Amino acid sequence: MKILCIGHAAYDITTPVDSFPVENTKNRVQERIECGGGPAGTAAYLLGKWGMETYFAGIVGDDLYGHNIAKEYATVGVNTDYLQISSQHTTTSSYIIANRENGSRTILTYRPSSMKMNPVKIDINPDMIIIDGQEPEVSAQVLRDNPNAISIIDAGRDRKEIRDLCKMVTYVACSKDFAQLVSGISIYDDESLNYAFKKLEEEFNTKIIITLEATGCAYRNESGKVEIVPSIKVKAIDSTGAGDIFHGALGYALALKWPLPEALRFANIAGAMSVTRIGGRNSIFELDEMLEVYNEIK
């Protein structure tokens, strides 16, 4: 199965701290973790690491960070024929403060507003497409050209381009924040969750998955009932990339034709386990470790 991931490619520099720094102070840190990042970018890395035939389409600068991202993909076998290296831009960079005390992360991202992929001919026919909305024109064209592919959007930011893409995919796998913004409903109990699902389904006319952070995620089952798939309890030290890893693991399970509830449970486990390590891509466990945990609690 060919899987094409399209979207955001960034370079993350993470500094773990034991508590969030006080404003207007100087602080010395003991660690600095560097790796690639970005929602679709991290999903592609996970899928390559787990042995899937994976392609990534996005844009980086012709600089150290951009070349490091390309090298990182090579280590896990991700095809980068559609990774554009631009001499006109610098690679998107994210500076992350990871608070070990509570697992939160604070991210500062620099990306030139003019930075986007040039038109590209995708000369493969992917069986699965995973997008994050960062490259709306390329994503929309690939979705139109491959109507039979399973497609997933990692919907985090409420923008018109992302709403338009949500109407073109098989699965809208969105954050709770996105669901609340689009539906206009504050999700705090089962009733409000049901109303939010109804609004999103009316808006996008496709299958909806809402991630609920440590709680897990929710979907509508075959009988029409909205159900929550619970996550596992872990001690979080860095939540960077947890959502990206969730979406990559979901793509992996759906590519293997797992039933949706099982695919979501597996994705929950991958996302939860990732927060026990520092750094986004460093938090992707080996596949055999993932399957062992999945089978233990099945």
Image (spheres, rainbow, N blue to C red):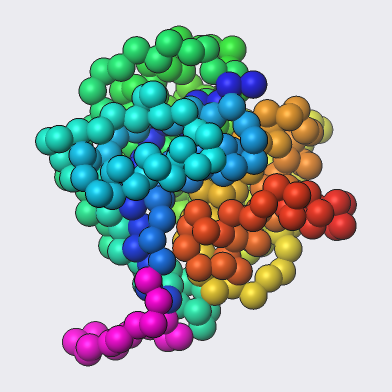
Viewer-proximal residue among 171 and 279? 279
Dominant secondary structure of the magenta stretch?
Answer: loop
Percent x, y of residue 273 = 65, 61
Compared across the picture, whether 88 is left or right of 13 comes to left
Viewer-proximal residue among 248 and 277? 277
Percent x, y of residue 193 = 62, 51
Query: Magenta stretch: residue 146 in it?
Result: no
Hey, which quadrant is residue 84 in on the image? top left
The count of marks equals: 0
Q: Is residue 123 visible from the viewing direction of this image? A: yes
Q: Is residue 219 above or below residue 242?
A: above
Which residue occupies 28% across, 49% down?
Answer: 65
Q: Is residue 198 visible from the viewing direction of this image? A: no
Percent x, y of residue 237 = 54, 74
Percent x, y of residue 71 = 40, 42
Query: Magenta stretch: residue 25 in it?
Result: yes
Q: Is residue 56 above or below residue 180?
A: above
Which residue occupies 31% across, 58% down?
Answer: 94
Which residue occupies 23% across, 23% down?
Answer: 118
Compared across the picture, whether 50 is left or right of 79 comes to right
Could you tell me which quadrant the N terminus lies in? top right
Magenta stretch bounds: 17-32
Hey, which quadrant is residue 292 in on the image? bottom right
Viewer-proximal residue among 18 and 113? 18
